Structure formats: structure tokens, C-alpha cells
Amino acid sequence: MNQTSPDVYVFCAGWGFRFLQMPNGRRQILGFLLPGDVLAGSLLHERLHFSVKALTAIQVSTMKRAELHARVAKNLRILWTAAECCAGEAKAADETIAALGQFSAEERIAHLFLQLMKRIADRNVIRDERYRVPLRQQHIADAVGLTPVHVSRVLSTFRERRVADLSNGVLEVFDLRELQRLGALN
Amino acid sequence: MNQTSPDVYVFCAGWGFRFLQMPNGRRQILGFLLPGDVLAGSLLHERLHFSVKALTAIQVSTMKRAELHARVAKNLRILWTAAECCAGEAKAADETIAALGQFSAEERIAHLFLQLMKRIADRNVIRDERYRVPLRQQHIADAVGLTPVHVSRVLSTFRERRVADLSNGVLEVFDLRELQRLGALN
DNA sequence: CGAGGAATTGATTTCCATCAATGACGGTGG
DNA sequence: CCACCGTCATTGATGGAAATCAATTCCTCG
């Protein structure tokens, strides 16, 4: 998916991610997009400052920005909820900054897992400790700023220590306490 | 400065920074606050998710959130400019994430310098290659996720290579090209 | 002048990247 | 059906970037 459009986007089904392509050819994943997420960047600007890519088959709902603006004129509440949405994104971004700046490899991955778990749990009534997470190790690497090789090693130790297991697109958490001790921000 | 208040804040004079206190005692600086900056987090929520600290003597203008909301009801444009402000902050946060995730020590510091220079230049008509930047090496370290010791080493090589010099609260840029080659995001 | 915080510099250690090889699948086509 | 690929994950060996530990110097300020 490219970067310019006259539309506002909402993720209805499937996973995707936002990323920046770096000058050196690497890429940084800024965040993952789950069903229900609004592409907040598209609310205001024609041109997004990041790129978007699908991880699975996805369904996206679009709305002309002009139409949205017209609606806003009639009903202010819409704008406030949009603002809420931006604020949530800002908070998530700040936490990611803190994790990348201060955390070790293990801690960063633990933090990513916790963040994803929370977002999935918010969307589903079912509360299992097994989550469908369709990420390759390469995606985790690009999200937390490590090499895929090192991600593999960390996931291996998580398995050995019976903390968590991510394989075949399923994240299973054995020791939530330990995961939180590693990756929580307070 | 603590985290809760009924007011919206605007920085009028002086420097400050937003940060998160980490569980391990370290802190991550999320961003620096320059004159003209709106504390966007305070637009919506009583409770900020970060803390704020002054770097110099500062002057801050406050407005009751209730009053702001009343104004918005009368004049929608205010809300749109507030949204613009949030969007700008989101973009900056995304770039910081990319820098922390993918850049080396030198590159991160170069990136921080470029970001600060741009923000200062936006505010001043005068365009010198000397900028007042009242940061200790500790602040740089906390902002880019390095130790103060290593920040000192990187700054030393910047001086040796005649790229830039930050000392005594003044950032002087000798080789903008090189700085951009190191720290630009595209 | 002395004290204490900030910066510099050197020595050593640790963590993660890099390089390289191998194994496990799933798909494709002969 | 099975040989051949490409992608992904795992594992080992090595190197390098930054952290850590430890002095020492340089300030500013009381």
C-alpha cells in the first residue's frame, strides 16, 4: 500500500503494519494494525509519513475525507473520539520509544508481546493465554530493532525458561508474571 | 512537574523535556519542549502519561481545559489546529522510534541534533549554524538511549572530524552534509 | 581554597550483529 | 511420488559496538 490517498482508513479484518523505509535499506516497523484500528495518520493529511503493508488477508473500510469533515461539522463528538484515538496512538508511540531506548533484547520482545496481548484482549471477549499472532521473526526483528537471528535466540530462551512460546502464528504465554517483570513499563 | 492538572499548557520561554521513569531507575526522554510547543497530551486528559521537567528557567502559559472546550464549541478551527499539532507530534515520535530502532550511536546523536536544529530554525528568523542548546550529555544520553560516557566519546569524534561541536550549551555545526548523511531519515 | 558535579579518557566486559552452515517445511513440476 | 526450491528457523563461531568500571581533569560555586 502506498502513501497517498483522499481516504480515511479503518482496519476491519486481518493484520497489517505501519513502517518507515530507512536509507540503509532496513525498515522500522512503527506499529501493528489490528481489526478496529483507525489509520490515524490518514485523518488529516493526504500524504502519510509512513508506509503500510498487510500481514494477512485484510479488509479495510474507507471513507472520503471530505465526507468525514462534513460529518464532523454536524456532530462534534466524532472529532473528540478522533482526538482520543490520536492520544492513544501517541501514548503507544511514547512507550515504544522507551522500550527501544532503555530495554535489552529480551525486554523489548517481552514488551512487544505484552502490548500485542493487551490489544488483542481488548478486542476479544475470550480470554485464553493463547493468541493468534501472525508474525514472522523478521517482523519482530524490524519492530524491536534486532536481527532475526537474535530474535530466534531470545524466543528459544523464552521457550526453555517456560515463559512464552511463539511459533506457527500462535503466541502462548506460560508465565505472565515473568513476561511482565521483563517488559512492563512501571 | 507532576502528572495531573486541569490545565492545558503552552511553553512560552525556556526549555524542558517530557520523559518516562523506567522501572529500573533509568529514564527515557521522549522529547524536548521548546518555546511555542503545546503540551499536546494535556489537551484531552487530566492525567499525562509522562512527566515533565524544566531544563532552564521557563515560562508557561496555562488555560483551563474547560475554557478551551468552550472555545472549541464556538470556533471549530481551533480543534483542527490542535489536531495538526497532534499529528506533528506523532510524526516526530515515529521518527524517534526509527532512529532508536535502526541507528548506531553516532547516527542517533546526529539525528537528535538535526531534529533540534530544525525546530530551533523554525522558531527563529536568524539562521546561524550556532544554536543555543542547553543540554547536558546526560540528557542526550537519556534521549537517545546511550550512556553519558559513550555520548562523550561520540561528541569527541564529532569534534575531531569537524562535524559538529556541542559544548557550553552551544551547538555549532561545521559539516551539515555529514551530519545529514549520518542522521537523516531518507 | 576546597567541594562537587560534569566531562574526558583508559581498560575490560557484555550483548548483540554478523557470517556461515544446517535443518524443517510447503509448494511445484517432472 | 519424489527431487528441487525458496522461505523460515535454528545453531555455532567470531567480531565489534557500546556498557561498565575506574581514574583523572575541569569547572563552577560556596
Image: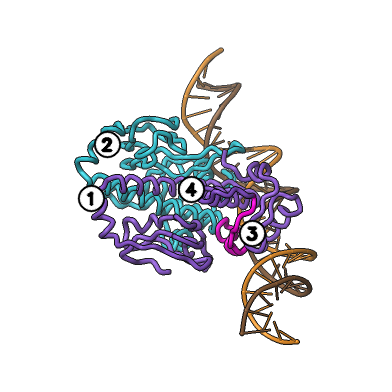
Chain colours: A cyan, B purple, C orange, D brown
Residue drawn 68% across and 43% down?
B178
Q: CA distance from mark 3 to mark 1?
A: 44 Å
Q: Total marks drawn? A: 4
Looking at numbered disc 2 in the image, what kind of residue is underneath it?
A: Leu
Q: Position of residue A96 (x, y in %)?
A: 47, 52
Q: Which residues are magenta?
A: B129-147
Identify the residue position indicated by label 1 in the image.
B73
Q: Quadrant of residue A72?
A: top left
Looking at numbered disc 1 in the image, what kind of residue is underneath it?
A: Ala
Protein chain holding label 1: B
Few, some or many C-alpha atoms within 10 Å of disc 3 (few <14, some 14-19, many ≥20)?
A: some
Protein chain holding label 2: A
Residue drawn 42% across and 64% down?
B60
Q: Nearer the viewer, mark 3 or mark 2?
A: 3
Question: Where the N terminus of chain B falls, by quadrant?
Answer: bottom left
Identify the residue position indicated by label 3 in the image.
B170
Protein chain holding label 4: B
- Residue B92 bears which disc, if any? 4
Q: Can you name the residue that lies furthest to the left here?
A: A74
Q: Position of residue B17 (x, y in %)?
A: 49, 61
Disc nearer the start of the sequence (4/1): 1
Of A170 and A64, the residue lying toward us:
A64
Few, some or many C-alpha atoms within 10 Å of disc 2 (few <14, some 14-19, many ≥20)?
A: some
Identify the residue position indicated by label 2 in the image.
A68
Q: Nearer the viewer, mark 4 or mark 1?
A: 1
